[in-house]
Image: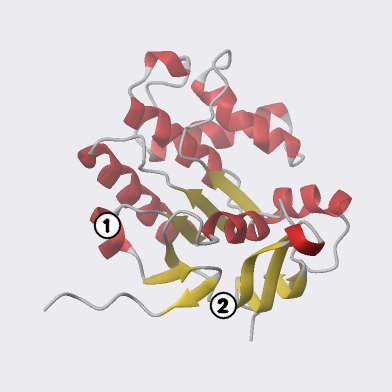
Amino acid sequence: MSDPAILLRGLTKTYGEGALAFQALKGIDLTVPRGEFMMLVGPSGSGKTTLLSILGCVLSPTTGEGFLFGDRLHGRRESELPELRLSYIGFIFQGHNLMSALTVEENVALPLEMRGYTHRQALAEAREVLTEVGLGEKLKKLPDALSGGQRQRVAVARAVAGRPPLILADEPTASLDSESGMQVTQLLKKLSVERGHTVVVVTHDNRIFHLADRTVFIEDGHLVPPPAKAA
């Protein structure tokens, strides 16, 4: 039986020390099966960004255990984290974070070259996935020539290129109108199914909640039951 995509046991994260210490995560237990499309929801300051940063191998937990596909997160040296990020994770940010001086295909190919692809292999994979997201005719365009929705589609393509097993999306619809946000999320869902990615989306956008296999709520550093529906 294979390990789950994400397994957290008693995970905590504390910033600072002594009287100034602040505990952002307070004993998180979470299992995310491989292939799940999960949304993480919580108010500002709830700990969701800290949790996403730990899952993204940007921060290390203070105590507790964390695993990505059976690979240990806790007790890692900071210098080990970049290799884990490259091995497991594709990121989608609130802003598309594209490099304005690079073409669409170059923006998607660059992270692949950092993972060890040759330049030719990276461009071939970039073109394939950009065609999948409906941007096959925009390969040579610069990001400024695209609409907001198109730029976020490039960001989705960049995240899924090379088939990293885990996709982490931080408020991917926040800068988009309702229609574009829905289209981008539907596209991410489609690609996750077709390509076998596990996806965690941090969002406040209740218009896309129905696309999740599961919605997990966090508040004050704890995972909590979903809010009761109004009568």
Provide the secondary structure element on which disc 1 rests: helix
Q: Position of residue 134 (x, y in %)?
A: 34, 34
Q: CA distance from mark 2 to mark 1?
A: 22 Å
Q: Position of residue 40 (x, y in %)?
A: 45, 63
**Quarter of the rendering containing residue 120:** top right
The answer to whether one can see residue 222 in this image is: yes
Where does the N terminus fall, quadrant-wise?
bottom right
Residue lying furthest front: 19
Is residue 148 placed above or below 77 in the rendered structure? above
The answer to which of marks 2 and 1 sits earlier in the sequence is: 2
Mark 2, Cα crowd under 10 Å, few <14 / some 14-19 / many 20+, is some
Residue depicted at x 60% and y 28%: 123
Q: Which residue is mark 2?
A: 30
**Quarter of the rendering containing residue 122:** top right
Residue in the foreground of this view, choosing between 60 and 164: 60
Residue depicted at x 36% and y 41%: 174
In the image: residue 107, left or right of residue 54: left
In the image: residue 41, left or right of residue 207: right
Q: Which residue is mark 1?
A: 206
Type of the residue with mark 1: Asn
Is residue 15 placed above or below 71 in the rendered structure? above
The answer to whether one can see residue 36 in this image is: no
Residue lying furthest bottom: 1
Using the image, tell me which numbered label, if any, was put on residue 152: none
Q: Are marks 2 and 1 in contact (CB under 8 Å)?
A: no
Is residue 194 placed above or below 132 in the rendered structure? below
**Quarter of the rendering containing residue 60:** bottom right
Mark 1, Cα crowd under 10 Å, few <14 / some 14-19 / many 20+, is few
Type of the residue with mark 2: Leu
